[in-house]
Image (cartoon, rainbow, N blue to C red):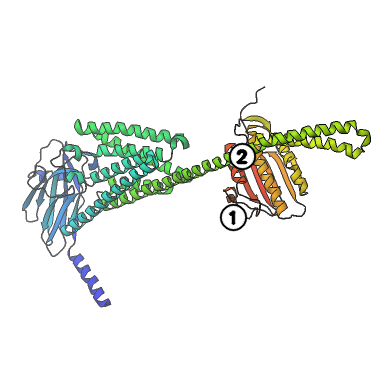
Amino acid sequence: MRTIVLLGLLFSLLLSADTKFIKSNSYAFIDAKKEFTLVTIPLAKKEFKPDVDSMFKFSDKIVWSYFTITNKSAYEQSLIIHNSIRFVRYVDVLVIHEDGTQDIFMIGTDRKHKYHSLGVLGYPLEIKPNERVEIYTRHNSIGLLNTNWNVSYIDEYYSDKALENSLLGGIFGVVFLVVVYGFILFYITGEKSNLCFNGFMIARALVILSLTGFFYTFSYDVGILIRTSIPLYVPMLMFFESLFLISLYNLKQTSTVFYRIFSTIAIVAVLMFLMGVYSIFILTSIVIMKSMIVYVGISAVLSLIFALYAVYKRWKGSLALLISIMLFIYVRYSYMNLIDENNRFTFIMLSATILETLLILLTLSLKVKEIYDEKIKAREIILNHAKYLSLGKMHAATIHQLRTPIAHIGAIASRVKFVFERHRHQLDEEEYNSSEELEQIVSMANSTITDLYNLYSTDQEKEFFDLKESIQEILLLVHPKSQKYDIEIILSLESAPIFNYPNSLKHIFIVIVENAIDILQERNILNPTINISLSKSETNYEIKICDNGGGISIKPIEDIFEMYKSSKKTKGLGLGLTLAKDLSNFSQAEIIAFNTEKGACFILQVPFTKKIKPS
């Protein structure tokens, strides 16, 4: 078996060695006076120079190219000479054999032969064994010229064309599917970025089909509009790409700098589109083409900078976007430089286009998933708020109902005190003081009811208040409970004037302190302690509440703020800290939970206000 493989490889090497040909470098000559013909062009051979700037010469001049092909094989070779630029309208070819005989090919729209495939205009050539031929060409192009001609074996050429057709079919299929997908996403989400994505994909497909000569092949009888469509499709591509990035990442809100940059690119794209129309119907201008190349280059670099910025910001899909833009820049830049040297560069461009499209689709999908997750989360928050609102209304109604019996108790306490005053001489000191205690308890209960009613009030407005005083008020409410379980509360408070929602911040504080008391009582902690401090940092006030109850068992610890997650075994419903988290967002504050060696700690960070307190 190994012998057969080795013989096969050796046979392949012998065949490849027997079918070699050599093509010389191409030289170009501009016949400004239009004085030479196919018959007389050999007389101008000394005027030909290395092709340096042929890519920027237009068809209003006679441009000649010259090169040689030498057959190093002992067999006759069937070759095809073809141009990599896909906008050639026609070509006239003079072939001079070593024996002095000449062949003339006139290929193209108005010529005898129409030997073309996907816009690659070429002509077949039979070269005898060990023969060297000279070739002169003059060709007319719709736009840019390329005087560097490629040579391929005919079989290889057609296999390459078949592969190109397959890749083009792949592009058609991918673009069709992603456009349908974009419309479905737009129908589901209503996001404008999906429509811009569709325009972006369609414009990109049109550019690729134009560069590969697809429209040229099928537009002989349609006229010059489709054949010269590149100046229209490129601005369309940049226009929709700019709108796509603006809408996808909501740059108007997230980055005003890049919003202005891409808005400018979109406006310039409209101007470039109008210039392209002018170039097609009125006057073909090299200035317009060069301006468009510069415009695309600058826009691509700005898109690359934005993609790097998006990756730095960790925006969804930014990495896929970055890779796609890097591919775009490399392939489009290389198109102008490598197409003269690599006749299979079209494969690279088509394959890269499919990959770019899939990467952009991935970017969109990841961003849409993020938007969908945010909507789900927003819906949950709305439902949670509805539950909290109902719970708060129920508590408020219950508290309101308690006002009447407490008022009756207060009236009875007043009568008891009056009776005690009349019969004071019959009572000892302890019995007499009990009436004073009863009145104080009723007064405190009434004050507690008022505070709780205000705490659950939904009609909140920002006020100037001192966080220190609010904390002290809440501690008066929880004092009976902490005293019942012998829980020591250690305070370290600074004055903290602030403009915010007092009831919201009070509720956050009371939820955290109540949870700490419940945990200390439930776990039967020896010497239960709650440390509460209020301090000032560079940007906000920090309220730190720590206990020695053993810590939070839920992992990751951030889940403690999720609904129905609780560390308490018997009393926990998992609602308090969820509400506290929502209220902190409402108050533009932040809650951080973490464990220490002794227990759990919560830090409530409340930002300063820039508003000046009125006098």
Q: Between marks 2 and 1, how big is the CA–CA gap? A: 33 Å
Q: State the mark number for residue 203.
A: none
- Residue 448 in the figure: left or right of residue 49: right
Name the outermost residue toward the top: 615
Tell me residue 181's x, y (percent): 33, 47
Which numbered disc, 2 or 1, marks the residue that appears first in the sequence? 2
Secondary structure type for disc 1: loop
Residue at screen point 66% across, 45% down: 512
Name the outermost residue toward the right: 425
Q: Is residue 544 visible?
A: yes
In the rendered structure, are the residues bearing label 2 and label 1 in contact, judged by CB atoms less than 8 Å apart? no
Three-letter amino acid code at the position of disc 1:
Lys
Q: In the image, is residue 271 above or below residue 375?
A: above
Please tell me in which quadrant of the rendered image residue 554 appears: bottom right
Between 9 and 62, the one nearer to me in the picture: 9
Residue at screen point 26% across, 34% down: 288
- Residue 386 in the figure: left or right of residue 114: right
Between 572 and 104, the one nearer to me in the picture: 572
- The residue singled out by tag 1 in the image is 555
Tell me residue 126's x, y (percent): 10, 57
- The residue singled out by tag 2 in the image is 394
Tell me residue 470's x, y (percent): 70, 35
Between 195 and 113, the one nearer to me in the picture: 195
Three-letter amino acid code at the position of disc 2:
Met
Q: Quadrant of the N terminus?
A: bottom left
Please tell me in which quadrant of the rendered image residue 282 appears: top left
Between 3 and 390, the one nearer to me in the picture: 390
